[in-house]
Every structure is written in C-alpha cells, then in structure tokens.
Image: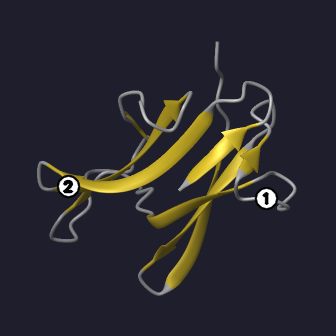
Amino acid sequence: AVARLQRSGLFLSVESYHADGYFQTALRLSRDLRAWSARTVLHRSQVHGRGRPAAGPQFDLYYPKFLSRDGSSHYLLDESEPFYVIATKPHALVYRELAIEIG
C-alpha cells in the first residue's frame, strides 16, 4: 500500500514480503513512485515462513494498508501525527499505531 505524506509530499509504502525464510513488514519512502528507499523493517515483524514466530511478541501483518489518525484516509497521511497500519491476520483484523520522523 502507498500513501502520500501531506507535509513533505513524499510517498510512504508498507509491504509484507518473504526473505530468508521469514515474512516481514517494512516501510519505504519515494519522491516519485519509481525510485524507493531501502526497506526499513518494522520492529518485531519477522515471522518464520512455516508459521513459527521469531522470539518475542509479533507484529505479523498481512495485506497491510495505512489509515490516518482520524480514520478519514488511507492514501493521505499527516506525518506530524501518528497514523495506523491496518492489516489482516489469520481470523483477525489488526492495527498498529506508528509515527515517523523525516528530516
């Protein structure tokens, strides 16, 4: 999923992907939707591909999307405020509050 950051004009993406035997969730930034920054893996997002989690509580989100703090948008975020990543999980809908600092 991709959202535009209101103040900076940058784009922020959230993705779930498989690497080295684990599913992970990460963020990336872009100025133009063509060139993207390296992945920034979200803390505790690593889940073993066979369903066994890495040590500690898990973030494990599938099909993630953004949601603004006030719940009005999934494609425009004010980066000066916390926002949410919402996603599915087997038999559940989950969310996590995030905040970013660009500068």
Disc number for residue 99 = none
Alpha carbon distance from label 2 to label 1: 30 Å
Disc number for residue 73 = 1
Q: How many marks?
A: 2
Residue 103 vertical position relative to residue 44 in the rendered view, above or below: above
The quarter of the displayed image where residue 36 is located: top left
Indicate left or right for 68 with 17 as reference.
right
In this orientation, which residue lies closer to the viewer: 89 or 31? 31
For marks 2 and 1 on the same chain, the one whose residue lies earlier in the sequence: 2
Instruction: Check disc 1: other Cα within 10 Å, few if <14, some if 14-19, many if 20+.
Output: few
Indicate left or right for 16 with 103 as reference.
left
| Residue farthest to the left, as pictured | 20
Residue 64: give x, y in percent of width and height.
51, 62
The structure residue drawn at horizontal position 75% and vertical position 44%, both measured from the top left corner, is 77
Amino acid type for the residue under numbered disc 2: Tyr
Indicate left or right for 73 with 32 as reference.
right
Residue 7: give x, y in percent of width and height.
80, 27
The structure residue drawn at horizontal position 79% and vertical position 59%, both measured from the top left corner, is 73
Identify the residue under disc 2: 22
In this orientation, which residue lies closer to the viewer: 34 or 71? 34
Amino acid type for the residue under numbered disc 1: Ser
